[in-house]
Image (tube, rainbow, N blue to C red):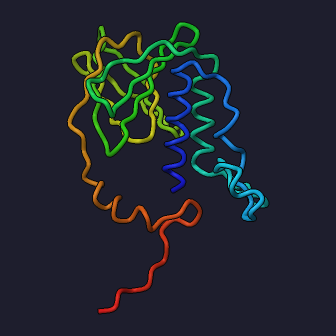
Amino acid sequence: TWSEQADYYHRWSLLCLAYGITRFYSGWFAFDCGDYYGAEHYGGCGIQRRIPYNDPKPAYAHYATMTRMLERADFDKWLATGSHSTYCLKFRRLGQSIYVLWTLRGRRPVELTLAGDESAIVTDGMDNAETVASKDRVITVMTSGSPVYVTGLDDVRTVKVGEPDHSGAVAWARTRNQQTWGTGPASRPEPIA
């Protein structure tokens, strides 16, 4: 689906930055390839639909958010979360810390332990931001497959994951193959009784 594409591209780019890759020659294509044989098997999926439409997909907003949040930032370090499926990366820009968090499937709360009580700004991939205040030096951020940015914190001491919520996994698995990149849920004939 378009949302999955946005999440995959976003996470892929963040991991590349963490490994020191700063030039992306492939992946974030401007638009989808054409629907004819000469183009379809050479290209990837764009962040806009194919010509002549070129209207933006969710990945377009993710790309803009990532660019805004990480412009002139350098990767600092990986923060251990205690999970092999939940990630926390730390970037630095002009002396400020930027934390990026996500989990691979479902939703999972992540507790960030701080040196003192403070507020943070949590920004999702679509550039929606909310201010979250800490309680007893802990800020809880809900993660999903879509990366979120946490800014405005001096220093995160520890990162601890909570219990995962996979309540949508069965519905997702049953409907996954009925969706396409361009059209969403496919129409299916009614079953014969």
Q: Is residue 72 left or right of residue 83?
A: right
14 and 107: which is toward the camera: 14
**Residue 19: x %, y % from top left:** 53, 20
**Residue 176: x %, y % from top left:** 41, 61
112 and 36: which is toward the camera: 36
**Residue 17: x %, y % from top left:** 56, 23
Q: Residue at x 24, y 21 (%)?
A: 135
Quadrant for the C terminus, please: bottom left
Q: Residue at x 31, y 11 (%)?
A: 157
97 and 45: which is toward the camera: 45
Q: Which of the 4 quarters of the picture holds residue 39?
A: bottom right
Q: Which residue is drawn at 36% across and 28% down?
A: 132
Relative to residue 191, is residue 47 depicted above or below? above
**Residue 42: x %, y % from top left:** 71, 51
Q: Is residue 27 left or right of residue 30?
A: left
Q: Is residue 8 left or right of residue 22?
A: left
83 and 47: which is toward the camera: 83
Relative to residue 2, is residue 161 depicted above or below? above
| Callout count | 0
Q: In this view, does 178 lie to the left or right of 72?
A: left
Q: Residue at x 21, y 17 (%)?
A: 136
Q: Which of the 4 quarters of the picture holds residue 61?
A: top right
Q: Which of the 4 quarters of the picture holds residue 79?
A: top left
Residue farthest to the bottom, as pictured: 193
Relative to residue 35, is residue 82 depicted above or below? above
